[in-house]
Amino acid sequence: MIHKDQTPLYGCLTGFELPCTSYELSSGLLLRQVYVDTFAAPMMAFAPPALPDKHSPGPWVPVRGGFSFECRVELCVLDSGRFDGFTSSLTAWMVAALFRLRIESPVRLAVLGNMPFDEMGERSQDAIAVAFEGGVNHLGLFKGKSLLATEDDLAFVRELLSNTARLYHDDRFFRAFSVYDEASWSPTVELGIVRIWTAIETLFGLGSAQNKTKAIAGALSDYISSSPSDRDRAYNVIRDLYQKRGRVVHVAGTVDQDDFMQTYAIARCAFRKVIIDGELPLFPNTQTLH
């Protein structure tokens, strides 16, 4: 097995390609082009194997479903690339999470490996590869299955790594950002939207607010808006979206795809601002919100 703290640690990323052969995110944290396809095709057998440890005899029938992940970027975490208090796998996850905040495609850290992936074929006896972000469902704002990353996309992650690592030591950010990122792997948009709003409640410390809809709409609209008129429009949108979240929780309501996308976009905007600013939002005064 792969130890979560071993170095070097290699991961393959889906959802984007590099505009260059390799890119250094920081000392000891490297990206490079690679070609890795991970796939699974379930099959059904209808008779037991003739001998132990042997496969079942045919004929077999394929089961529709399965999955495939196309990885075109390799991440290498060296010992010097780990952030203070971080394991190698947590460092790798943080890189993937930042790319998810930036790139509008299904970015996932599909597999972790103990050696460069382009060496595994010739060193199969020594190669170890384990699934990491292997959930079949992937929710988010996607413009395509895979996009070509720009220099600005790469610089975004490079420049915000230290801010994110420092914030992650704060329990409020750790819990909020982890729940927000986990929403991507929810089996339904309804569960995903509940997780996103839970993350926002945690981020703003509003879990026990008296009038939670009003408190969240006020705090979040104030935080992400650039002008009073923008804030007023955002307040109404956020209020309506949070009320729809309430119908999911209390009466098992369904969520429209557009409502999920808008909720996801607003939450992403908030977490991007937190990381860019390098500080958590102040606890709002819920007595004075709108």
Image: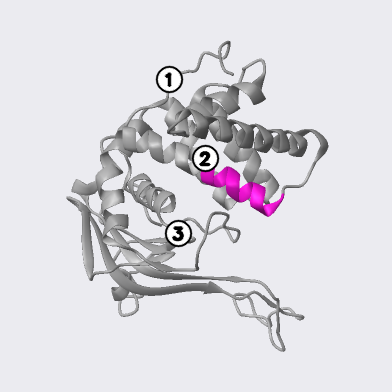
Choose top left, top right, bottom left or bottom right for residue 42.
Answer: bottom right
Q: Which residues are magenta?
A: 256-266
The circle on residue 267 is 2
Q: Which residue: 17% across, 50% down?
A: 27
Q: Nearer the viewer, mark 1 or mark 3?
A: 1
Percent x, y of residue 215 = 60, 21
User: What's the CA distance linking mark 2 and mark 3?
Assistant: 17 Å
Secondary structure mostly taken by the magenta-highlighted segment of the chain = helix
The percent position of residue 243, horizontal first and vertical second, equals 71, 33
Please tell me whether mark 2 sits on a helix, a strand or a loop. helix
Which mark is on residue 282? 1
246 relative to 134 in the view: left or right: right
90 or 162: nearer the viewer: 162
Pick the front one: 2 or 111: 111
Separation of marks 1 and 2 at Cα, in angstroms: 16 Å
On screen, 59 above or below 133?
below
Residue 195's quadrant in the figure? top right
The amino acid type, in three-letter code, at marker 3 is Val
Q: Amino acid at mark 2?
A: Ala
Ranked by sequence position, the earlier of labels 2 and 3 is 3
Which residue is label 3 attached to? 107
- Cα distance between the residues tagged 1 and 3: 30 Å
